[in-house]
Amino acid sequence: MASLSPGLRCWTVEVTLSKNDAWILVAIGGRGEYTTLRHVITSADYLNRLLPTSDEIEEAINHLGRVGLVVVSAKGFALTPSGVKVLDDLGAAKKGVIRLMLDLMKAWEGISVEDVAPGFTYRIDPTAYDAAVEGYPRGGMA
């Protein structure tokens, strides 16, 4: 049995998390407030000096949604209470976001987690993605 964070148990069932999933989770960040696609993209660029592709975002959101860490609505993306707990358990309040991302990447690489929402599906709107990155200065937050 693996653990996403102390107190949050998981079983090897269906979803295998990756470094990209950790990258996008930290980019969404926050305390459960909704954030826009552009904010996720710019935050991810700040964290990793690389813009995530639409495929990377879509795959990560699907993984994170299926394991119950992220929700998506017309308002955007938000961490669930479990998503906030993962970051809190890693010491989010005491360390910078880049260190947080690196620690989560290390902890999550290849971990298999119970699929608690197998019907969760997110498809990125290519037009929305293009609009979010249009005119964005790469290599730093706008």
Image (cartoon, helix red, strand yellow):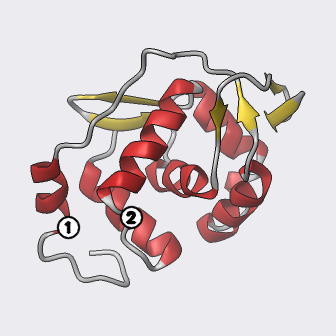
Which residue in the protein does label 1 denote? 133
Element at label 1: helix
User: Looking at the picture, how far across and down is residue 7, in whole percent?
Assistant: 84, 26
The reply, left or right, for residue 140 in relation to residue 126 is: right
Identify the residue at image location x=51%, y=39%.
31
The reply, left or right, for residue 141 in relation to residue 27 is: left
* Marks 1,2: beta carbons within 8 A: no
Q: Crowding at label 1, few (<14), some or many (≥20) Cα neighbours within 10 Å?
A: some
Query: Which numbered tag is attached to residue 52?
Result: 2
User: Looking at the picture, how far across and down is residue 140, in whole percent?
Assistant: 36, 81
User: Looking at the picture, how far across and down is residue 6, in whole percent?
Assistant: 86, 34
User: Looking at the picture, how far across and down is residue 109, in whole percent?
Assistant: 73, 53
Q: What whole-number distance in Å separates the C-alpha atoms at marks 1 and 2?
A: 10 Å
Query: Which numbered tag is attached to residue 60?
Result: none
- The quarter of the rendered structure image containing the N terminus is top right
Relative to 123, is 52 above or below? below
Upstream in sequence: badge 1 or badge 2? 2
Identify the residue at image location x=9%, y=51%.
127
Count how many numbered circles sit on residues in the image. Answer: 2
Element at label 2: loop
Identity of the amino acid at label 1?
Answer: Val
Identity of the amino acid at label 2?
Answer: Pro
- The quarter of the rendered structure image containing the C terminus is bottom left
Identify the residue at image location x=64%, y=61%.
101
The single residue placed furthest to the front in the displayed view is 14
Q: Is residue 73 visible?
A: yes
Rendering quarter of residue 56: bottom left
The reply, left or right, for residue 69 in relation to residue 132 is: right
Relative to 51, is 80 above or below? above
Rendering quarter of residue 9: top right
Rendering quarter of residue 103: bottom right
Q: Crowding at label 2, few (<14), some or many (≥20) Cα neighbours within 10 Å?
A: many
